[in-house]
Amino acid sequence: MIKKSLLVSTCVLGLSSVFAVDVEEYNKVSGVSGSVTSIGSDTLNNLMALWSESFQALYPNVKFEIEGKGSSTAPPALIEGTSQLGPMSRAMKDSEIDAFEKAYGYKPTPIRVAIDALAVFAHKDNPIKGLTMEQVDGIFSSTLKSGSEDIKTWGAVGLEGEWGIKPISLYGRNSASGTYGFFKKVSLLKGDFKKTVKEQPGSSAVIQGIASDISGLGYSGIGYITSGVRALPLGESEDELHEPSFENCLNGNYPLARFLYVYINKKPSEPVDAATAEFLKFVLSKEGQEIVAKDGYFPLTDAVCKEDKAKL
């Protein structure tokens, strides 16, 4: 989760242009070749493909293999050495960091690569104006840790007429997903999902389900939005609902803002292999962050890019 204090300290707050990418341009170097394997997040899968395609245009001798089955697949792959890149839509758990450190004697290195508004999507024709986080818990959770009532119909969140009697049809991700873990931690306060949530293997499947179900409601990264769904404003109260916008992610008003990460195995005081290092430098460059914006996510600020490039 991106905390407001973190955003204020690390993000440029002059937002005259919402998608302005004020980051240093990438400088190509010579002699970069090899193979790079990426195993991890489904949310980041499309971005990884776009980044690698643009990177290969600069370095044709670098070959990529990309697999996106969920964030929880990244730590084991890094530990086993079957991937150099571990994309994750959440921060690593303490247990995952501990397992890595037990294997190597040092911690994995997190590189922030984009900002995401984890969105709650409804069908495009649904008239709901937005939801409070307590309502989100009441809709998706069986444990109701926010103190919410159990919410099963659209009438329970204020819709009337024919909409009022419609049951809310729930869509979500499976437990291998970092999006599942992040939503469970922040929206459900670490509570349990209802058994009626239809778990999907990928983000696009969640969106497709909602788009074809007039009563559908689900969660996914903002980059997967289509014309068939609406990303709902969220907030702590009905009087303070905030759109999942770039500005609301930066200023901390949107409650489900998060960084997206790529984890790497970097020995302390030793450089990362050239292909991995240059790829991540490209991702953290103006060109790389423009790809982030084009893919529907939000670009990092120059301060964050410089801070994480220094880790390489």
Image: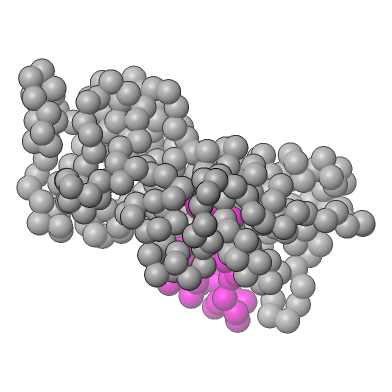
**Residue 194 seen by the camera:** no
86 vs 270: above or below:
above
Residue drawn where x is 67% and y is 39% of the image: 50
- Asked where in the image residue 164 lies, by quadrant, the reply is top left
The quadrant of the image that shows the N terminus is bottom left
Q: Position of residue 179 (x, y in %)?
A: 40, 49
Q: Position of residue 158 (x, y in %)?
A: 10, 33
- Total count of labels: 0
Q: Position of residue 5 (x, y in %)?
A: 40, 70
The quadrant of the image that shows the C terminus is bottom right
Q: Is residue 182 magenta?
A: no
- Magenta range is 91-116
- Left/right of residue 27 with respect to residue 246 in the rendered view: right
Q: Position of residue 83 (x, y in %)?
A: 66, 56
- Left/right of residue 37 with respect to residue 183 in the rendered view: right
In the picture as drawn, the residue positioned furthest to the front comes out as 16
Q: Is residue 105 magenta?
A: yes
In this view, the residue in front, 126 or 66, is 126
Residue drawn where x is 22% and y is 57% of the image: 191
308 vs 154: above or below:
below
**Residue 249 seen by the camera:** yes
